[in-house]
Image: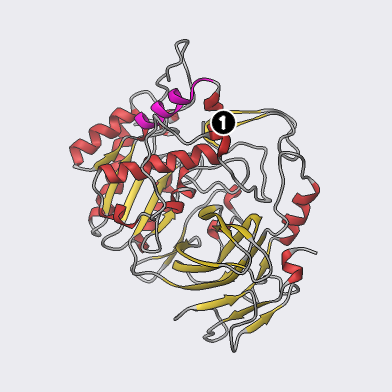
Amino acid sequence: MNLIEQRFFTILFLLIQATFVPLIAQTFSFDGREKDAIQVTPDDIYSNEKGYGYDFQEVIAEARKSQNETYHLSDGIFYFSVTVPDGNYKVTVTLGSKKSKGNTTVRAESRRLFIQNVETKRGEFKTCSFVVNKRNTTIQLPDGKMDHVRIKKREEGKMNWDDKLTIEVNGDMPAVSSITIEPANDVPTIWLCGNSTVVDQDYEPWASWGQMITRWFTDQVAIANYAESGETATSFIAAGRLKKIVSLMKEGDYLFMEFGHNDQKEKRPGSGAFYNYVYALKQFVDEARARGVTPIFVTPTQRRSFDGNGKIQETHSNYPEAMRWAAKDLGVQLIELHDMTRVFYETLGVENSKHAFVHYPVHTYPSQANAFEDNTHFNPYGAYEISKMIVEGMKGLNLPIAAFLREDYTPFTPSKPDEWRTFYWNDGPFVDIVKPDGN
């Protein structure tokens, strides 16, 4: 009998015309102590009509059948979803149990990391809060008309683009006493624009820094990751992703842009680092500044491409330099992720740097018939380390947003990375053996 079957859950909802429109906090109690709460049994599976419930149980059950010595799911893993409108939501989780000790990790939406391996003793409770950005594809235009983000086929059905906020409870021994969800639209939002090195990767073993950087901020900041695999600066705009962000951004927010990986492969008339690439970056900057939003450029992450002397080779042509030039010309602050990742890979070395990327022997993951040897896309460890480089970049620029780092964040330098051998990640049930778009 798993954790869900052993317990009954209670949920307190404030309903308006039968829709889940949160005006004040909605509390989800896992131990039945909340008064006037809706009692939820293990049979309460999420549906659009109900608006809440356990989610993806079939995915978890199917993944358990494919477990092996390397890929293993926690016995207590579960997902819980609630229908809410677009916006930022403060989520407060009380971790712990009266009956047992716990080790709990909490992620949300498409594997965004928020709470990591928190230990609780039997009868001990710890409360943690964070802010989750929830969105769908609908764009509300100023004239009252509607438009939609033109997402790619592979994005359809993903947790980042639906009408519900989904919480993933994971860890070696997950123990959650209660979850409270309430609006948090008054906090500054960091909007992330980019490609597969930034996107919230839905599937193991892929990961990107945009879904890890959420780990380092308090509930005074929201991070909205609009990046998508395969995107260029121009295709990001053409798909309506920037239009969606513009419809929601507010004064005091930040707009982060990391492009360059895929842009260099564009061959259309007018393509080029100092042509359509820089022109597209200027569109991002203009839209941000028109709304009191601070634009930040991020030079692209290096690829794992070593020369015979163990040094990283430049594979991005003149795109990083074009971004630097645009930053100077437009007066935009810039984070040198290109240089930091070079130091990081060279510090790890030719062989050990594989542990930051999706390099895994055959059969490590279910249905994996061939070895993974991807030198562009990160695994959770690599993404985790690079998220710290972004944080250090924020600190180096003296961005006010850096004041909202969590107390357990410790200074980081790429030349002294965390030990990959001791990094720990609880696998989720979603696995994909096909690499993301882009290279």
Nearer the observer, 282 or 123: 123
Nearer the observer, 302 or 340: 340
* Predominant secondary structure, magenta span: helix
Q: Is residue 243 left or right of residue 93?
A: left
| Residue found 51% across the figure and 20% down from its top | 350
Q: Can residue 267 be seen in this snapshot?
A: no
**Is residue 226 found inside the magenta-colored segment of the image?**
no
Tell me if residue 285 comes above or below residue 381 in the rendering: below
Q: How many marks?
A: 1
Quadrant the N terminus occupies: bottom right
Return the x and y of residue 63 as percentages of the image width and height.
Answer: 75, 50
Return the x and y of residue 72 as percentages of the image width and height.
Answer: 72, 46
Return the x and y of residue 289 as percentages of the image width and height.
Answer: 23, 54
Question: What crowding class fits label 1: few (fewer than 14 Cα within 10 Å), some (14-19), or many (20 or more)?
Answer: some
Name the residue that disc number 1 marks: 355
| Residue found 58% across the figure and 63% down from its top | 167
Disc 1 is placed on an element classified as helix
Colour scheme shown? secondary structure
Looking at the rendering, the stretch of residues picked out in magenta corresponds to: 338-350
Tell me if residue 35 comes above or below residue 430 in the rendering: below
Q: Quadrant of residue 188?
A: bottom left
**Is residue 343 found inside the magenta-colored segment of the image?**
yes
Q: Amino acid at mark 1?
A: His
Return the x and y of residue 434 as percentages of the image width and height.
Answer: 65, 37
Tell me if residue 173 comes above or below residue 235 in the rendering: below
